[in-house]
C-alpha cells in the first residue's frame, strides 16, 4: 500500500508536527488522547496489534530490512512511527469522538508506536526502575544493615592529629618514615645463631655484658636511644668479627662510646670508660677497637632499633607514664636474652607494648588502632609476649638482675614490682 496515495480517501498526511494531525478544519494535537484509551472506547473495533513502550522496540535489523524493501518508507521518529489513517466516528454515547486506524498492521512490523508525551497518566507504562521496587528495597535494607554493622566497629584513631602544629613531629612525613624503617629493619638484624662462629665466647657471656651495660647506661644517665643502638652495634660487630673473651668487655665499651657520639649531646670521655672497666684496657686499645668496629660496620650507624618503633607504638596505644615504663622494662629484659634476636625490632616493640597492657589491665588488650599502626595482630605477638612474661617472672630471682634493680628505684616508679601477666602463659596450648 502506498501511504502517499492522495486518492485513498481513508488516508491523510500529517501537515504539521507541532500543530498535530489536521482533518478538514479540525485539529488533533495537544488535546489528543492515547491511542490505547481511544481504542478501548470503540464499538466493535479490533484492538491494535500491540502498544509498546521503548523496551518492546522491534529488532533494529528488522527495521533496517523493511526500510530497504520500501524505498518510500520514512524513518521512525519519536513522535510518529508511521502515517496513521484516522477517521472520525461518533461515540456510542454521543459525547466524544473516537479515532480508529485503518492502516495495515503488516506494514508497521505488527506494531505501532505511540508518543509517550501524548499518553494519559493511566496508560503510562510502569518505569523499569519501579518494577524492581521490592528488590531495591531489600537491597537498601541490606545496605542499612551493613552500615549499622560498620558503625559498631572500633574506629582507628588519628594519633597524629594532636601534633598537627608541631613541626618536630613531622606529621606530613611520619608514615613515609616508618614505612622506610620497616623496609630497613631487616638489614639491621643479625642471624639468631651467629654465636656459633665464635670460638671463645658464647651467648651467656653476651647476656652478662648487656646486663652490665644497662647499668652503666643508667649511671651515666644517657638517652634511651643510646642503649638500643649500643646493643645493635655489639651484635652486628660480633656477627662479623671473632673476639676473644678478654676483649668482649672492650667491645661493649667502644659500642657505647660510638652510640654516644651518634645520639648524645654530651659524650663520655675515653678516660671515664677506662675507669668503668677498672683500667682493664688502655686508651690505645679503646681507640684501636673503635677504628676496627667502624670499619667492620662500614660506618653504618643509622639503623632502626626497637626504640624507634617503641615511641610510635606507645603513641598509638595512648599509654600513660606507668605503662610506658613497664613497656621499656619488658623490652630491656628482652635485650639481655640472646634468643630474642630472632624477632624483628618492630615485633619486639609491639610485643612489649602489648604485654605491658595485659600486665596493667589484667586481660588481653590490643586495639584496632594499635594493630593498624604496628601491622601486627594479637596472634602474631603472642609468642614473643609469652617469652617476655617469662623474663618478667624470673627477673628478680635470676642470675642477671641488672634490669630489675634499675626499675625497682623511685626514678622508674618501682615498675619492676608489678605482677607479671601470667594468664598469657596459661592460655598457651
Image (spheres, rainbow, N blue to C red):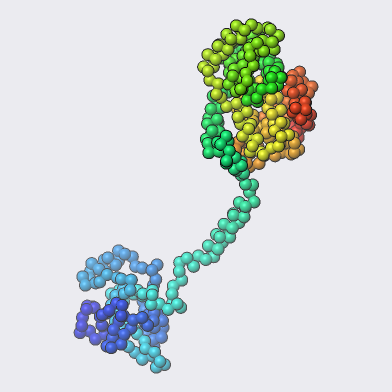
Q: Which is nearer the eye, 61 or 227?
A: 227
Residue at the bottom extreme? 94
In the picture, residue 405 is in which quadrant?
Answer: top right
Residue at image point 61% right, 31% down: 309
Residue at image point 65% right, 10% down: 271
Expressed as whole percent of the image width and height from the top left, the position of residue 134 reads: 54, 65
403 left or right of 303 in image: right
In the picture, residue 245 is in which quadrant?
Answer: top right
Q: Which is nearer the eye, 33 or 246?
A: 246
Residue at image point 53% right, 27% down: 184
Question: Which quarter of the image is occupied by the N terminus?
Answer: bottom left
Residue at image point 66% right, 20% down: 338
Expressed as whole percent of the image width and height from the top left, the position of residue 182 reads: 55, 31
Taking 319 as reference, is 144 above or below it?
A: below
Taking 189 as reference, is 180 above or below it?
A: below
Disc count in the image? 0
Expressed as whole percent of the image width and height from the top left, the position of residue 109 reads: 31, 72
Judge whether residue 85 can be spotted in this image. yes
Expressed as whole percent of the image width and height from the top left, the position of residue 67 reads: 25, 68
Question: Which quarter of the image is occupied by the C terminus?
Answer: top right
In the picture, residue 334 is in which quadrant?
Answer: top right
Residue at the front extreme? 266
Taking 378 as reference, is 10 above or below it?
A: below
Amino acid at each position: 500500500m502506498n501511504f502517499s496515495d492522495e486518492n485513498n480517501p481513508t488516508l491523510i498526511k500529517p501537515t504539521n508536527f507541532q500543530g498535530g494531525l489536521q482533518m478538514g478544519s479540525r485539529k488533533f494535537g495537544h488535546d489528543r488522547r492515547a491511542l490505547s484509551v481511544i481504542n478501548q472506547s470503540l464499538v466493535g473495533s479490533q484492538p491494535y496489534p500491540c502498544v509498546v513502550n521503548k523496551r518492546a522496540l522491534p529488532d533494529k535489523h528488522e527495521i533496517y530490512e523493511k526500510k530497504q524493501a520500501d524505498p518510500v518508507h520514512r524513518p521512525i521518529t519519536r513522535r510518529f512511527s508511521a502515517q496513521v489513517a484516522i477517521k472520525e466516528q461518533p461515540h456510542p454515547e454521543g459525547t466524544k469522538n473516537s479515532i480508529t486506524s485503518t492502516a495495515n498492521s503488516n506494514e508497521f512490523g505488527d506494531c505501532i508506536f505511540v508518543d509517550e508525551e501524548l499518553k494519559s497518566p493511566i496508560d503510562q507504562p510502569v518505569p523499569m526502575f519501579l518494577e524492581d521496587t521490592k528488590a531495591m528495597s531489600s537491597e537498601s535494607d541490606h545496605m542499612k544493615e551493613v552500615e549499622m554493622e560498620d558503625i559498631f566497629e572500633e574506629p582507628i584513631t588519628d594519633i597524629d592529629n594532636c601534633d598537627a602544629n608541631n613541626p618536630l613531629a613531622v606529621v606530613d612525613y611520619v608514615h613515609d618514615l616508618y614505612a622506610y624503617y620497616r623496609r630497613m629493619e631487616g638489614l639491621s638484624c643479625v642471624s639468631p645463631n651467629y654465636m656459633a662462629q665464635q670460638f671463645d665466647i658464647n651467648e651467656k657471656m653476651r647476656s652478662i655484658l648487656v646486663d652490665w651495660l644497662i647499668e652503666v647506661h643508667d649511671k651515666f644517665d644517657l638517652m634511651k636511644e643510646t642503649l638500643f643502638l649500643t646493643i645493635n652495634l655489639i651484635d652486628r660487630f660480633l656477627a662479623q668479627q671473632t673476639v676473644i673473651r678478654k676483649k668482649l668487655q672492650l667491645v661493649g665499651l667502644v659500642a657505647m662510646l660510638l652510640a654516644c657520639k651518634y645520639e648524645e649531646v654530651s659524650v663520655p670521655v675515653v678516660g671515664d670508660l677506662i675507669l668503668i672497666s677498672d683500667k682493664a684496657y688502655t686508651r690505645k686499645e679503646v681507640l684501636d677497637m673503635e677504628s676496627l668496629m667502624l670499619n667492620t660496620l662500614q660506618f653504618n650507624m643509622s639503623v632502626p632499633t626497637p626504640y624507634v618503633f617503641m615511641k610510635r607504638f606507645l603513641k598509638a596505644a595512648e599509654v600513660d607514664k606507668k605503662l610506658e615504663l613497664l613497656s621499656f622494662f619488658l623490652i630491656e629484659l628482652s635485650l639481655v636474652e640472646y634468643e630474642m634476636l630472632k624477632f624483628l625490632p618492630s615485633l619486639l616493640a609491639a610485643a612489649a607494648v602489648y604485654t605491658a597492657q595485659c600486665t596493667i589491665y589484667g586481660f588481653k588488650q590490643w586495639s584496632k588502632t594499635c594493630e593498624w599502626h604496628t601491622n601486627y595482630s594479637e596472634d602474631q605477638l603472642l609468642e614473643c609476649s609469652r617469652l617476655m612474661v617469662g623474663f618478667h617472672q624470673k627477673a628478680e630471682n635470676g642470675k642477671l638482675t641488672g634490669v630489675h634493680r634499675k626499675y625497682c628505684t623511685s626514678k622508674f616508679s618501682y615498675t619492676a614490682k608489678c605482677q607479671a601477666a601470667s594468664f598469657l602463659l596459661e592460655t598457651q596450648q
